Image: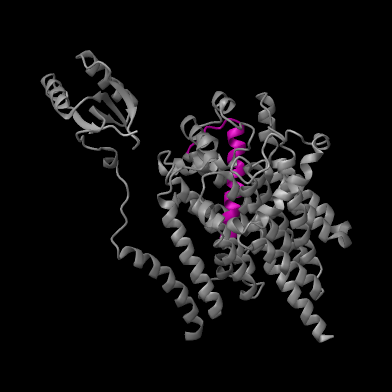
């Protein structure tokens, strides 16, 4: 019985040792949607983001609203993590971006400054 | 995705039960890899037919297609008098230490392959250029959208692989092109399990495991086996079909031909070259059975005709939509107008098959095994394997020769490296049988 089990034990042990050895370095990290959000830093391409949406109709509704209150050049883009974001590209600096965020807040729109990624 | 693959295994298990039944549950477990490949092939073919006739593609369609195959198989099994094996205590088969160490290496290899595939990006050109867009179209539109497929590159390529990819998207719940690579991991594991399950009781572990391990560690397999495109699935289907037909050459079980027919049908619906490589397998079997032509050839012809007939709905759809089947630029007599390309095409084929940086020494080892088997006095299996490689090399030469617009190069613009993979994956399927044949021939000589 032992001689029959021993080779099978070798197979099972090897199959368990590899994932165990990998897991000793920490559990695997899987990307999440937050990986597509990069906070703005000075000297990089900056954009103001007016929200992220799972559905196109929601993104279009937000776009209509931000265009309606005067944020010209706003557009809808895929964010690379399966969602649509409404943003204004080409914000020249963090300071200008903060003014833009303050103006948006006055009309009840939440905006964030992010680094624009290709 | 796990649920989808368990479903494909269940469908294939019902199919295999109808084909041959089992003597024990241990035997059923051993043949799970073959069952899975048959599940992929049969469900994939039915799903392609469903798309062709315009049945909306959904989870219900995927389950329904599998259910159709499984129910028909179970009805056939009942009529054929198949009975489930008796419930006995499951006994582990005896495993040599060599086989155990080899199996452990394969298990760790597949785990590592899973790890690399889990976060693989969709960078392969043909993958993002048209294979995955086709799958996304099936996923989003629920059919073979006329306009989209007309405007997409290579609309004439058969759609089994995008259909399997779209099924994976459906079960994932989104068109996740990263996780999609794991579907190809399941297919690859199924392929390896099918080879091991079929060969383990028939050949010595010394003949089974080294060829398999050699193929697994080739740079091309380690780097590209999980690509989200059609090449590896095509080659896996063809290799398992070649193995089942190789078994038929000396066991003559009808179920083996039916299984080969289903696998070849799926291969022909996976890529245009599936018909060419499938024909090579059948022609090699025809060559190996020339002494039994009266009994063997009609059966092999039925396998070929049956497999080709399964692809007819797709070609009819192309015809109805007035789309080109994208055949060879210089097929038929066109080859003679480009006779100057014959020799460079053959040279490219041979140099790719022997390219150490792609395939290590897989093909030289196969040819050496065949030569040794002939020297030992074996004939049928070495003859079959030799014809496979001869016809295979001719077919690969044709794939370059018949497309004069494609440069004769190993650069990715010419698919020769990807296509040569079928003669590489065939190696661990056929060479163990060749070596066993050689060993038996030597034994027979010793006895006389």
Relative side of B17 to B298, left or right: left
Above or below, B405 relative to A108: below
* Relative image position of residue B83 (x, y in whole percent): 62, 64
Q: In percent of the image, x 70 and y 68: which residue is there?
A: B433
Q: In percent of the image, x 46 and y 32: which residue is there?
A: B140
Magenta segment's dominant SS is: helix
Tell me the magenta residue range: B32-58
Above or below, B317 relative to A74: below
Relative side of B135 to B276, left or right: left
* Relative image position of residue A77 (x, y in whole percent): 33, 27
Whether residue A96 is visible here, answered yes or no, is: yes
Above or below, B319 relative to B378: above
Quadrant of res A55: top left
Relative side of B187 to B265, left or right: left
Whether residue B240 is visible here, answered yes or no, is: no
Relative to the observer, which residue lies in front, B23 or B106? B106
Q: How many marks?
A: 0
* Image quadrant occupied by the C terminus of chain B: bottom right
Relative side of B407 to B370, left or right: left
| Colouring method of the image | one colour
Relative to the observer, which residue lies in front, B41 or A91? A91
* Relative image position of residue B128 (x, y in whole percent): 50, 37
Residue A3 included in the magenta stretch of the image: no
* Relative image position of residue A26 (x, y in whole percent): 28, 61
Relative to the observer, which residue lies in front, B322 or B201? B322
Q: In percent of the image, x 68 and y 39: which residue is there?
A: B311
């Amino acid at each position: 019985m032992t001689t029959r089990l021993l080779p099978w034990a070798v197979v099972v042990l090897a199959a368990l040792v590899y994932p165990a050895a990998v897991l000793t370095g920490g559990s695997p990290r899987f990307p999440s949607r937050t990986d597509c959000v990069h906070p703005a830093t000075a000297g990089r391409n900056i954009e103001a983001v007016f929200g992220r949406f799972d559905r196109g109709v929601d993104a279009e509704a937000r776009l209509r609203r931000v265009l309606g209150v005067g944020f010209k050049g706003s557009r809808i883009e895929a964010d690379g993590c399966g969602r649509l974001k409404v943003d204004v590209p080409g914000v020249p600096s963090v300071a200008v971006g903060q003014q833009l965020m303050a103006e948006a807040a006055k009309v009840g729109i939440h905006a964030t400054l992010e680094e624009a990624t290709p | 995705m796990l649920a989808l693959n368990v479903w494909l295994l269940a469908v294939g298990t019902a199919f295999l039960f109808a084909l041959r039944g089992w003597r024990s549950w241990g035997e059923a477990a051993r043949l799970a890899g073959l069952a899975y490949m048959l599940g992929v092939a049969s469900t994939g073919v039915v799903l392609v037919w469903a798309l062709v006739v315009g049945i909306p593609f959904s989870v219900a369609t995927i389950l329904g297609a599998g259910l159709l195959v499984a129910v028909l198989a179970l009805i056939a099994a009942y009529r054929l008098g198949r009975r489930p094996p008796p419930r006995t205590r499951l006994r582990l088969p005896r495993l040599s230490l060599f086989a155990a160490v080899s199996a452990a290496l394969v298990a760790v290899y597949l785990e590592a392959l899973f790890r690399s595939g889990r976060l693989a990006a969709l960078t392969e050109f043909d993958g993002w250029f048209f294979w995955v867009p086709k799958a996304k179209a099936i996923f989003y539109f629920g059919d073979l959208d006329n306009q989209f497929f007309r405007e997409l590159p290579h609309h004439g390529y058969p759609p089994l692989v995008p259909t399997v990819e779209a099924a994976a998207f459906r079960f994932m719940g989104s068109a996740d092109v990263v996780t999609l690579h794991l579907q190809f991991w399941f297919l690859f594991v199924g392929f390896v399990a099918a080879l091991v399950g079929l060969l383990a009781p028939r050949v010595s572990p010394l003949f089974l495991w080294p060829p398999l391990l050699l193929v697994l560690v080739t740079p091309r397999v380690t780097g590209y086996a999980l690509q989200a495109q059609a090449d590896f699935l095509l080659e896996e289907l063809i290799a398992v079909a070649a193995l089942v037909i190789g078994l038929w050459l000396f066991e003559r079980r009808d179920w083996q031909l039916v299984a080969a027919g289903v696998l070849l049908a799926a291969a022909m619906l996976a890529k245009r070259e599936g018909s060419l490589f499938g024909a090579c397998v059948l022609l090699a079997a025809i060559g190996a059975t020339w002494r039994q032509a009266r009994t063997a050839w009609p059966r092999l012809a039925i396998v070929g005709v049956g497999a080709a007939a399964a692809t007819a709905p797709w070609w009819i759809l192309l015809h109805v939509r007035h789309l080109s089947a994208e055949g060879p630029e210089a097929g038929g007599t066109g080859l003679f107008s480009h006779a100057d390309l014959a020799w460079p095409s053959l040279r490219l084929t041979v140099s790719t098959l022997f390219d150490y940086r792609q395939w290590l020494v897989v093909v030289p080892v196969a040819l050496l095994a065949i030569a040794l088997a002939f020297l030992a006095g074996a004939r049928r299996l070495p003859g079959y394997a030799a014809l496979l490689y001869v016809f295979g090399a001719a077919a690969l030469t044709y794939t370059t020769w018949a497309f004069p617009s494609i440069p004769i190069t190993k650069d990715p613009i010419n698919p020769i490296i990807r296509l040569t993979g079928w003669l590489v994956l065939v190696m661990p399927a056929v060479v163990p049988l060749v070596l066993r044949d050689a060993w038996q021939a030597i034994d027979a000589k010793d006895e006389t």
